Amino acid sequence: MKEKEMHCYHFAAEISAPIHVVFQCLNKDEHVLKWNTQIIRNIYEGSEEDLEAGSTFTTVQKIGGKVYELKGKYVEYDPPYFAVVETETKEGISKTEYRLEELDGETSFTVDVYLIPSSWIYKTTMKMMKWAVKRMYDEQFERFVDYIHTEM
């Protein structure tokens, strides 16, 4: 973690599915749009099939009744083990790291979210609202785990 980054969220789960299945459900829109209630659609510069480090996209999300279009970038991409996605907003840069590890017939899944705030106001706001961020992300990633267990 870099000095200016604030660690905002952590999630970890052991999922009873092979790593390639977990990664597909995490990364492919045909699955993501079924478990993530915030994402309306992703628009890729190029094809979703050609993602690599440096690939950019626009994600259209509905959060708290408002629709946002956020520019995203795959900063690191090593399927099915690791991906780092950054989005930039007026609040700063949000960085989400996904790590998957093969275990005996299961997959260890870990997510960490960081924010590089654009100002002290957003840094203070994030510190005060960390509980709400945790609640929002927990709901989505619990849905992700449930989706894999029930749909796959």
Image: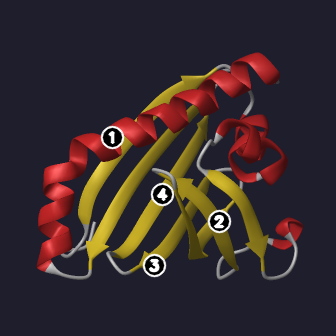
| Type of the residue with mark 3 | Glu
The answer to which image quadrant residue 138 occupies is top left
Residue linked to disc 2: 60
Is residue 105 visible in the rendered image? The answer is no
Q: Return the mark for residue 88.
A: 3
| Type of the residue with mark 4 | Glu
Q: Is residue 38 left or right of residue 87?
A: right
Q: Return the mark for residue 12.
A: none
Q: Is residue 68 left or right of residue 59?
A: left
Residue linked to disc 1: 134
Q: Earlier in the sequence, mark 4 or mark 1?
A: 4
Residue linked to disc 4: 97
Element under disc 3: strand
Residue at the image point whose x is 41% and y is 41% from the top: 136
Residue closer to the observer: 50 or 101: 50
Q: Relative to 4, is 146 above or below?
A: above
Q: Position of residue 11 (x, y in %)?
A: 41, 37
Q: Residues within 10 Å of mark 3 (few under 14, many from 20)?
A: some
> What is the quadrant of the C terminus in the image?
top right
| Type of the residue with mark 2 | Val
Q: Residues within 10 Å of mark 1 (few under 14, many from 20)?
A: some
Query: Which of labels 4 and 1 is toward the front?
Result: 1
Separation (CA) of disc 4 from disc 3? 15 Å
